[in-house]
Image: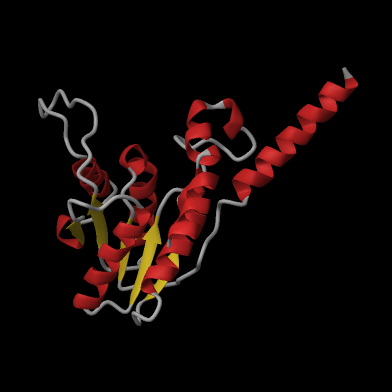
Amino acid sequence: MRACALLLAAWVLLAWVAARALVVQAGLARADAIAVLSGSSAYVERTRWAAQLFNEGRAPEIILTDDKERGGWSSEQQRNPFFVERAFEELRRAGVPAEKIVVLPLPQAASGTYDESLTLRDYATTHGLHSLLVVTSAYHSRRALWTLRRVFRGSGVVVGLDPAAADEPSPAPFAWWVDRRGWQTVATEYPKLVYYWLRY
């Protein structure tokens, strides 16, 4: 019984360390724009955090990337809106003016954080942006920052990253392993990290 308790305690500690290790931040007090990485069902936590940063005066506009994924059924609209549409409306509800939101479509062949970073780099360089503050989910932040730094290297654009807190709907670091979503967001992130390190 005591051995089981020790094993459980060790697992809880290991799980917490594994989750916390995925969360990083690269401070940027102000930027030319805030970019919200697309994340389908994670759009709420990302856009709310981006709106808070915008309302604090951290950047004059917000860029949404469109992954062309549709969400659930909307009774009001009688269709399945795209997640980027939902993200747009979430920003509006949080007080961000519509004219301060840029929707940036991703190429049809785009898949994942690397291609999204390439699109953001192209937009930033062609529109004369010198700095970009990127918002994503907490457990995606280490891979996102690694990718962004690799893609933006030599572009002249300074990139910062400010992740949304690991909170609803993302599970807390100490309890992610008791939640199905935790296994989807924490456990699967390590294989993705390895893939990115080897691929890019």
In the drawing, does residue 14 fall left or right of residue 21? Answer: right
The coloring applied to the image is: secondary structure
Residue 9, located in which quarter of the rendered image? top right
Q: Is residue 87 above or below residue 50?
A: above
Residue placed most toward the observer, 176 or 94: 176
Location of residue 113 (image quadrant): bottom left
Q: Is residue 136 above or below residue 177?
A: below
Residue at the image point whose x is 26% and y is 72% from the top? 124
- Residue at the spot x=60%, y=44% of the render? 19
State which quarter of the image contains the C terminus.
bottom left
Quarter of the picture containing the N terminus is top right
Q: Position of residue 181 (x, y in %)?
A: 48, 31
Can residue 55 be seen here? no
Q: Quadrant of residue 169?
A: top left
Q: Extreme front residue here? A: 198
Q: Percent x, y for residue 176?
A: 58, 34
